[in-house]
Amino acid sequence: MPYIAVTALSDTGLVREHNEDSFVAGPWTLCATMTENPQTLLFPLGTPLVVAVADGLGGQPAGEVASALVVRRLAGLGPSLDGEQAVRDALDLCNHSVYAAADRDPGLTAMGTTVAGAVVLPDSVLVFNVGDSKVYEVGEDHLRQVSVDDSPPPAPGRRTTSAVTQTLGGSFNRTPISAHVSHSPLAVGDRWLICSDGLTDPVPDEELDDLLRVHDGGRAAYELWKAAIESGGPDNITLALIRIGE
């Protein structure tokens, strides 16, 4: 019987004082805290399963509040996310919820978060993102980014940029979003990597690809985290690996 294996890890990194990332897999959330080891959860293939990473905006207040709010909202909505429009509506609701929470507490003004994830359906997968957290399709001979970065081109001589052009919340005035959502077929053996930029900023795609060709599950999560730490661990590191098994 086909099943979904989700392996997740979240860590503060070596520079930040606390973790502003949050994570959701089905009804299970991990909010602004860290795992001592990779955690693997198994789910039956059938009811829509949402897996997502939210990265609270650094340099603005309460990023951890925004990221936790979004993943908890997605956990509640997950079983209803049966198509592209349902995902877009859910992300619009998350955006509204972040602004509404900030309206109630001036200390949360302009808090925001990115989000990236996938909804696994019985015979297909919906990939979505707002911001610069990423989703990759892990093929046998390639690693392909399937999310769309909401960020300007990096400065000359740099591989990455910390600027983002679209987030959930993050502004003084309510700003609508235009979520990126794509649809692709599903097969046993398919794999995806979902992560915050605390992994992808210090670790190039080529190195991610090399590690994922060799490792899977908890060992892959550990090796990816280790690569980010050995590259300086400049930001919070949160990642989720999805695999379709039988």
Image (spheres, rainbow, N blue to C red):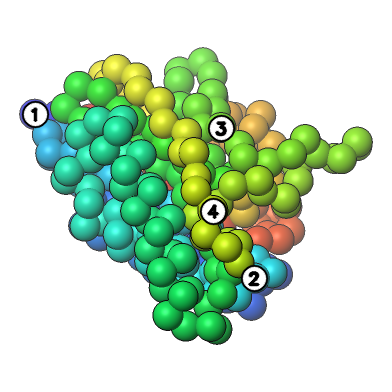
Amino acid carrying label 2: it is Gln
Pointers 4 and 2 in contact (CB under 8 A)?
no
Which circle marks residue 1 in the picture? 1
- Residue beneath label 2, please? 60
Q: CA distance from mark 1 to mark 3?
A: 33 Å
Q: Secondary structure at mark 4?
A: loop
Tell me if residue 51 comes above or below residue 148 in the rendering. Answer: below
> Is residue 29 left or right of 47 when viewed as pictured?
right
Q: How would you rate the neighbour count of disc 4 (Cα within 10 Å): few for under 14, some for 14-19, many for 20 or more?
A: some
> Where residue 94 sits: x, y (%)?
38, 56
Which circle marks residue 25 in the picture? none
Identify the residue at image location x=74%, y=39%: 152
Amino acid carrying label 4: it is Thr
On the question of residue 236 being in view, the answer is: no
- Residue beneath label 3, please? 148
Pointers 2 and 1 in contact (CB under 8 A)?
no
> Is residue 118 left or right of 197 when viewed as pictured?
left
Q: Quadrant of residue 182?
A: top left
Amino acid carrying label 3: it is Val
On the question of residue 170 being in view, the answer is: yes
Q: Mark 4 or mark 2, which has the lower sequence index?
A: 2
Q: How would you rate the neighbour count of disc 3 (Cα within 10 Å): few for under 14, some for 14-19, many for 20 or more?
A: many
Tell me if residue 51 comes above or below residue 32 in the rendering. Answer: above
Identify the residue at image location x=91%, y=36%: 156
Q: Mark 2 or mark 1, which has the lower sequence index?
A: 1
- Residue beneath label 4, please? 175
